[in-house]
Amino acid sequence: MVKGNELKAKVETASLVALRSFLDFLFPSENDRWLSVLRIGLGLQTVVYAFFLRSDWHYLFASRGKGLVGREVGEAITSFDSPLIPKLSWLVALGRSVNMSEEAVLSVAWACLLCAGCFLLLGLFCRPAAILAWFLHLCATESGGLLAYGADNFMTTALFYLMLSPLPDHYSFDQWVIKTKPKNPQLLGFWRRVLQVHLCFVYFIGGLAKCLGNGWWNGSNLWRSLIRPPFNLVSPDILVRFKYALPVLGISICLLEVSYPVFIWMRRTRRVWLVCILAMHAAIGLLMGLYLFALVLIVLNLAAFGPNWRIGSRGFYLGANAPAPSSR
Amino acid sequence: MVSGRVVLCTNASRGLGFDLSVGRRNLDCQKFCLLEKFSAIVAHHPNSTEENQGNEGTFQIKAFVSSLASICIPLLGQAQQKNGRPGDRSLPFGQMFPKRIYAACFGIHFLLITAVCLAGLFSLIAESATVLPAALEPYARKAEVAAAWLLGKKAAASSPVRRCIATYLHAAGIQAGYTFFAPNVPGYHRLTLELFYNDGRVEHESPHLRSKATGLRLESLLDRLAEQRYEPIREVLVKMLAFSVWREHPDVKKIRAVFGSVTPPDIAEFEQGKAETFQPIFSFDFSLRDRHGEGQ
């Protein structure tokens, strides 16, 4: 009976220690440099997104009969999931109530998205700008529906986290003009953790799914990725010259992604994994023309696991005393 | 009966957690033992103090991680609800934040992400798209159904739970998994529009966007057209795409839309000079008789 109680007590103590460690992991003390990277990066991303869609904005999101497929189809599919998901039709209906035409509303929405991106870039009205950018981008993505792709989801996620993070950060214009109280370092740490854990999910699942396909082990998937339109920026004739490198690169991508959640946390391997992942995304951007996709993932990786940059008199350098993403 | 008070406070230096005050009389022996062990764990921390004021005394434990107290909620029952006070006394009011709520949100958020990711992964296994043996397919299908249940997809379309989960997933951009270009890169799809003019001319055209940077969105649309789940709206979508081209060629009499998959050659075939192959999947004929631009 006594032994049973002791065992029970030990289990309880161990579970308490484990929970304590988990909460320690969840709420580390962090500075806000990662948040600056995220804000500036997403500001840039939003501006680039707006400029990329500038000429096709009305064509993509106009109602039926005016655009490519009309936003009604995408919105109907979205509404089937939930009618509460924001869409551009909400804004059009709002504009109609003040006698604004659909075209005018779409133009205003595009201009607001661009402004929100610029404000994020400068750090001006950080929180409202982040909320506006997230909302307008979400409206566009959901109304686009079938025209959306991976970069849109990542951008929504990144703006969602930015919007909830403790803004403004140290390097924002807001902080410069209105000296606000320093943010709780553990709250900053929590949001960075969320970003870090999310990226681990992204790469682990992506890597695992790739490992389950034979095409990544013999390089054929890499070949097919690079020659299919509209990703075929590199001539197949050039790719053929590197045909023996394709299986190696394919396997490397699989292993890099699937092992990301392990090696990115280790101090010794973190920098190597981060550089490799950044190089992979840069290559995706340059060789396949997936600029938005590459940019958003580079920004997310730099914010989540990047070194703690500090602005000094000699430019950027590594923060010597800055806490690491994980010291465990 | 022993009567006293246990207060779990925060660690000032780390700014963690919240306070928890409970009357000892409200705790049974086992629960109190647990608190004592917890006290022992944190007693080594430099900021820990313990006070005992006799029968009416108060034990004050400065916790290394006092948010651990949130985990004790099931053990402490209603006691915390009566006297619990979120926040950190060592922090200014503006910097307080309820850690247990953050931790719970973290758990729910990543539970949903896990469910979405696993649903996508199990779906691939169930569809025999992976190198895994076919014997796993029925299990993968069951696991996919379980993940879908967790996401509320098995509930009625009007279910508030389902709608709330779906809204959250879309708002956070986590409604889709991360199996890009996996497990294998499929062939791509092509929609060719044959434009028949009144004078007998025939031209070939494809739907296009003005900017090349957004061109890949159109490819995304075409890839989805081939999916079985979009079969009910396939004709409507192709009609709209045809109509978008017709607006640029208003004198066209009829449009035939041919949609198919393109299989590119592999490296060896490419070196032998083999070109890609086109396999038609479906086609539609649209007669443009309405002056106001409605395709028939």
Image (cartoon, helix red, strand yellow):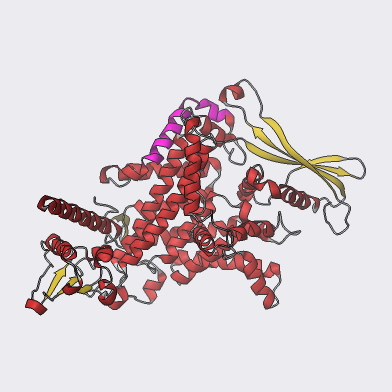
Residue name at image x 12 percent, y 67 percent = B48
Measured as percent of width and height from the top left, residue A104 is found at 68, 70
Residue name at image x 41 percent, y 70 percent = A173
User: Where on the picture, by quarter, is residue A174?
Assistant: bottom left
Viewer-nearest residue: A214 or A79: A79
Please say whether residue B225 is visible from this viewpoint. Answer: yes
Of helix, strand and loop, which mostly describes the magenta segment? helix
Viewer-nearest residue: B239 or A80: A80
Measured as percent of width and height from the top left, residue B106 is found at 37, 59
User: Where on the picture, by quarter, is residue A145?
Assistant: bottom right
Is residue A255 located in the magenta-colored stretch of the structure? yes
Viewer-nearest residue: B58 or A271: B58
Measured as percent of width and height from the top left, residue B226 is found at 66, 42
Please say whether residue A321 is visible from this viewpoint. Answer: no
Q: Is residue B19 left or right of residue B1?
A: right
Taking the view exactly as shown, the residue that stands out farthest to the top is B272
Q: Is residue B24 left or right of residue A258?
A: left
User: Which quarter of the rendered picture does the N terminus of chain B lie within?
Assistant: bottom left
Task: Determine whether B124 is above or below B161 in the image.
Answer: above
What is the magenta range?
A237-259
